[in-house]
Image (cartoon, rainbow, N blue to C red):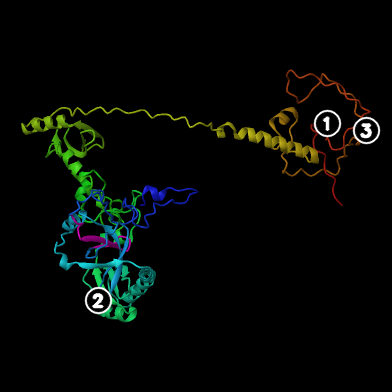
């Protein structure tokens, strides 16, 4: 979760606040604290508080060190501090008077002699050596997990932190039960050639070290600002009228979300107005059971055992019914509150849906027209089911379906003579029309018999003729 300056830039690239990892707003460093006392000037005789807070591993771990040097360190500056058998490199996180409050918060003794010392500002060689050890942490973590698995230890390694000089390694692990890792420490010391320190952490601390994005879309609270973890139980969810769903109420650590406690005090104050011992009320219809409390509208919802309908009652009405029930009187009606139902606001989306303007019937007509044109062009006969309704109306006589077999022809019956292909036809009476719908159509003029007919166009007089008998094949 970076600050606003880090998130803005040109050409899609972050501009950066030039904090080099020590953002003053606390967004670029985990578990950071904004020093709101840094702008207060000190008197000439006053000296700054000699203890500073140093963060390691990008804020994953913090510690306090005694500053006996004459340097005045600023926030975000890299310094060399006293380590176990050597030195370590950290980043200044907090200086000045605010460090006193932090030490009091964590319960650290003010005796400065018990604190480790600040050595000097970090040099280039020390920073390079520290970066090499940080690159080694991933390989050490994978190898250490394999070793713990081979020893059949019920533990999970969450993080490995190497000292800047590479002389010490701290292994952070989680386990449900006590683990005997005496053999594990000997294997780690011989494998990595370092001094081993094992630290057991909880599931919430592990989630804070690993980090991640919560269901709210923001970075986890335990990895940014939350330092003390309070116990969370399902009672907090019940007070807030939340469904007891373990999947939705659990965080990435597998425990109940810490944010369930954030608004619990507000809900407790709001529920103090509601009457107590109001789980059931007696009426003439029967006993009504309390279903839920709505603290935003100050309503209590009741329902009968033989019905699923719920009745919203005001707090005043519930108190009246409870007072009558104590006197042994059962009310006739609950007198529920009438809730106003808001009409849905119609939003003009700014476009017109044209999908429904095209019907399948129009598409079928177009496809039938294209099929008829192709059949006429190829000269193939059409069946009644393939011809359109207009052609069937115009066609006069009936025709057998296309795929039905024709009856065999009697060989003794003489074959009817067919008209020749290019013989002229007699003139047709325009007033006589068979098989045509009567309407406002004008009669056609007689066609010139001397004009030849196109070869690809079927003859119109063949449409009403019965099918010709087949000639037996030899």
Instruction: Locate residue 184, reporting x and y percent.
Output: 28, 78
Q: Is residue 67 left or right of residue 432?
A: left
State the separation of the CA atoms marked 1 and 3.
Answer: 13 Å
Between 61 and 129, the one nearer to me in the picture: 129
Instruction: Name the N-terminal-most of marks 2 and 1.
Output: 2
- Mark 1 residue element: helix
Which SS class for mark 2? Answer: loop
Residue 266, given in percent of the width and then of the height, sits at: 20, 41
**Distance from the alpha carbon under mark 2 to that under mark 3:** 114 Å
Magenta highlight range:
46-63
- The residue that mark 1 highlights is 461
Left or right of 391 on screen, residue 184: left
Q: Position of residue 165 (x, y in %)?
A: 32, 73
At x 29% / y 69%, what residue is drawn?
88
Residue at left offset 32%, top offset 52% = 24
On the picture, is 400 further left or further right than 102? right
Q: Indicate whether 226 appears above or below 463.
A: below
Mark 2 burial class by Cα count in 10 Å: few <14, some 14-19, many 20+:
some
Dot 1 or dot 3: first in sequence order is 3
Q: Which residue is mark 2?
A: 181
Of marks 2 and 1, the one in the foreground: 2
What is the distance, in whole Å, between disc 2 and disc 1 at their CAs? 106 Å
- Whether residue 163 appears in this view of the structure is yes
For residue 383, say whether it is visible: no
| Tag 1 near tag 3, CB within 8 Å | no
Label 3, on which residue?
A: 423
- Taking 249 as reference, is 368 above or below it? above
Q: Residue furthest left?
A: 327
In which quadrant of the rendered view does residue 359 lie?
Answer: top right
């Amino acid at each position: 979760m970076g600050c606003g300056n880090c998130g803005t830039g040109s050409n899609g690239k972050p501009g950066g606040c030039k904090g080099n990892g020590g953002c003053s707003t606390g967004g670029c460093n985990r578990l950071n604290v904004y020093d709101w006392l840094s702008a207060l000037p000190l008197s000439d005789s006053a000296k700054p508080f000699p203890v500073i807070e140093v963060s390691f591993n990008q804020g994953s771990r913090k510690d306090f060190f005694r500053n006996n040097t004459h340097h005045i360190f600023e926030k975000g500056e890299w310094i060399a501090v006293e380590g176990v058998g050597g030195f370590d490199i950290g980043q200044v996180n907090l200086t000045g008077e605010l460090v006193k409050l932090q030490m009091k918060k964590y319960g650290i003794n003010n005796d400065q002699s018990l604190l480790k010392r600040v050595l000097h500002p970090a040099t280039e060689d020390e920073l390079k050596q520290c970066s090499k050890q940080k690159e080694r942490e991933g390989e050490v973590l994978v190898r250490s997990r394999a070793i713990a698995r081979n020893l059949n230890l019920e533990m999970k390694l969450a993080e490995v932190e190497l000292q800047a000089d590479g002389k010490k390694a701290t292994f952070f692990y989680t386990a449900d039960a006590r683990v005997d890792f005496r053999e594990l420490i000997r294997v780690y010391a011989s494998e990595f050639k370092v001094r081993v320190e094992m630290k057991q952490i909880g599931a919430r601390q592990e989630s804070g070290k690993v980090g991640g994005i919560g269901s709210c879309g923001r970075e986890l609270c335990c990895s940014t600002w939350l330092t003390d973890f309070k116990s969370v139980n399902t009672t907090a969810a019940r007070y807030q009228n939340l469904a007891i769903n373990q999947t939705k109420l659990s965080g990435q650590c597998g425990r109940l979300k810490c944010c369930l406690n954030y608004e619990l005090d507000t809900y407790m104050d709001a529920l103090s107005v509601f009457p107590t011992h109001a789980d059931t009320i007696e009426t003439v219809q029967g006993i009504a059971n309390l279903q839920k409390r709505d603290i935003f509208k100050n309503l209590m919802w009741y329902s009968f055992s033989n019905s699923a309908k719920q009745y919203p009652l005001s707090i005043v009405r519930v108190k009246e019914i409870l007072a009558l029930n104590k006197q042994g009187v059962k009310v006739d009606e609950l007198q529920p509150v009438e809730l106003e139902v808001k009409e849905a606001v119609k939003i003009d989306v700014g476009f017109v849906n044209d999908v429904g303007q095209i019907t399948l019937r129009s598409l079928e007509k177009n496809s039938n027209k294209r099929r008829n044109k192709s059949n006429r062009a190829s000269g193939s006969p059409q069946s009644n089911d393939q011809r359109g309704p207009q052609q069937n109306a115009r066609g006069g006589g009936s025709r057998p379906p296309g795929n039905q077999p024709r009856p065999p022809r009697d060989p003794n019956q003489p074959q009817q003579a067919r008209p020749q292909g290019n013989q002229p036809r007699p003139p047709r009476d325009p007033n006589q029309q068979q098989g045509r719908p009567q309407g406002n159509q004008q009669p056609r003029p007689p066609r010139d018999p001397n004009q030849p007919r196109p070869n690809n166009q079927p003859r119109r007089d063949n449409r009403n003729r019965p099918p010709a008998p087949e000639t037996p094949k030899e």
